[in-house]
Image (tube, grey):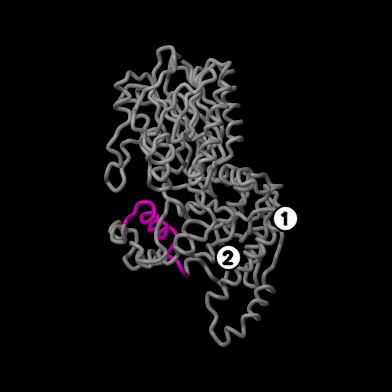
Amino acid sequence: MRFALAQVNTRVGDISRNVERILGAIRAAAEANADVVVFPELTVPGYPPNDALERVSFVRENIEAVKVLAEATRDLTLHALVGFVDGNREAFGKPAYNAVAQLHRGEVVDIFYKTLLPTYDVFDEQRYFNANGMLRAGSLGHGVRFAPLLCEDLWYETKRGGCFLYGTNPLEPLMLQGVDVIVNLSASPFSLTKAAQRLEVAAHAARRYDRPVVYTNLVGMNEGLVFDGGSFVMGRRGKVVAQAKRFDEDLLLWDDAAPTSAVRPKPVPDPEAAYRAAVLGIRDFFDKTRQPPLAVIGLSGGMDSALVAAMAVDALGPDRVVAATLPSAISSRGSVNDSRKLARRLGLRLFRLPIARSVSALRSALAPAFGELPEDVTEENLQARVRGTLLMALANKLGGTVLNTGNKSELAVGYCTLYGDLIGGLSPLGDLYKTEVYEVGRWYNRTHRGAAIPRAIFDKAPSAELRPGQTDQDDLPPYPVLDAILSRFVEHDDSAEDIVARGTATADVVARVLRMVARSEYKRRQAPPVLRLHERAFGPGWRYPIMGRFPV
């Protein structure tokens, strides 16, 4: 039997667009003589649909779309397994099921439901869906039976806080029904460690049950979640025998009767994976929000803005990226010159918008209120807010969207200014620590012609340049120390005592950093959407209080 794994890029809520992509993949699979084409989870409505699932009309529209898709298979011999939302026809429970429809010869011949509903990190499926209460194997004809799983159903040994989340293994009852192949329709978000975890989970199931695993994953960015594709077939011995592209749409073909040999998945280094995920996220942000495809970026002469500019160029093309350098009275000549060099190498339009006069005008306007009060961070923040205002005005006038250039280290400790450098429609680096930004920048220069990011940007000490001679380390621990503390606290939920015990930093330094994290929650609530690149990003997967005692 020949399988086609249709790795498609869906748009949440745009059912007609998603149907077009599904129909195109069905036709391509039929032309390739596939017997079965497998799509990702919730392909029809897009993933994650979130509160759109509360709308009866939305669920109804997606069900009607499945009928249209079924009709498209009338003159075909293949079976199509398509993720969608089915309504609950009972008088109790949640209004919907996370489901897969089996389409064949113009009919919806079977429907299967998801069993394990994740409710942790970015997932909140128990809010919307009923769990499957009847596990059934399906038939693909020719005597081939399959175990229908939806994403988390394969992750039945998931642990949180040292405890298994689920007391059910959906595969156990399915395998007793005489299954030949395990089929998983997935919408598994990207993180720097997730691709390896997927392969490990699938390999474990393949070896345990001596069955191949067909795993189709979503690709694209929705709601800050990047889906990296990488669909694969895991042989019964736990070795990959076929794998699709990552970060791009693809149709992967696999014939279960053909001689198989292990395929060594090409490893993608973390810096490259982070960069490609961010480029995909930027491209999809402009495409799926239907914003005019024009990115506006403030170039400071530092690494963060340089890397965002490079990402935007790769995502949209240089003609769709506009940059501005916004020097103040204390900006270094090198920062302006480095920004010019970068813009020239990337082929960007660059505007020079000095802010000194605007800042001076604001200080004069505020003088009666400030009186003889000494200067402090207030005057520094005025500079950041003037820059934010000018960038927003430039975006408004040109019909573009500002891309935020902040990183995770700054966002974690609040080293950023509300209505200043926190502006923007999307934060491509908001889930990369400062040290990682430099790693990605070095990878970029090694792999792109012309080493677009000037050497001086790597060499200079990071600085917001809001006061003479300022560097970030005047206010923060060295970034390697800061990032190590933040990583243990944010990604691993370590306590202050745990972090100190690891020898990461002294108790005083750790306590100071975690106080900064706690005090900055209100800023993070007002930050642009962050592209999720780690296992835990600021946003839907981070739910800590603004008020009350922040647990450290």
Q: Residue furthest top?
A: 142
Give the prevailing secondary structure in the magenta stretch: helix
Residue nearest the observer in this picture, 80 or 7: 80
Based on the displayed image, in which of its 4 quarters is residue 281 positioned?
top right
As displayed, is residue 336 above or below residue 50?
A: below
Q: Amino acid at mark 2?
A: Tyr
Looking at the image, residue 133 sits to the left or right of residue 8; the answer is left
Work out whether mark 2 precedes mark 1 in sequence or the reverse, and give the earlier one. 1
Say which element carries label 1: helix
Amino acid type, callout 1: Leu
> For the point 36% across and 26% down, which residue is it?
238
Q: Residue at x 54, y 56 (%)?
A: 528
Tell me if residue 90 is in the magenta stretch. Answer: no
Which portion, as a residue range, is magenta? 475-494
Based on the picture, tell me whether residue 482 belongs to the magenta stretch. yes
Residue 171 in the figure: left or right of residue 110: left
The quarter of the rendered structure image containing the C terminus is bottom left
Position in image of residue 484 (x %, y %): 39, 56
Q: Which mark is residue 463?
A: none
Q: Nearer the viewer, residue 440 or 156?
A: 156
Task: Find residue 242 and report its horizontal and vertical position in percent.
Answer: 46, 24
Circle 2 packing at 10 Å, graded few (<14), some (14-19), many (20+), is some
Farthest residue in the front direction? 91
Q: Residue beneath label 1, please?
A: 398
Residue designated by label 2: 419
Please name whichever residue, 55 or 50, is drawn nearer the observer in this view of the structure: 55
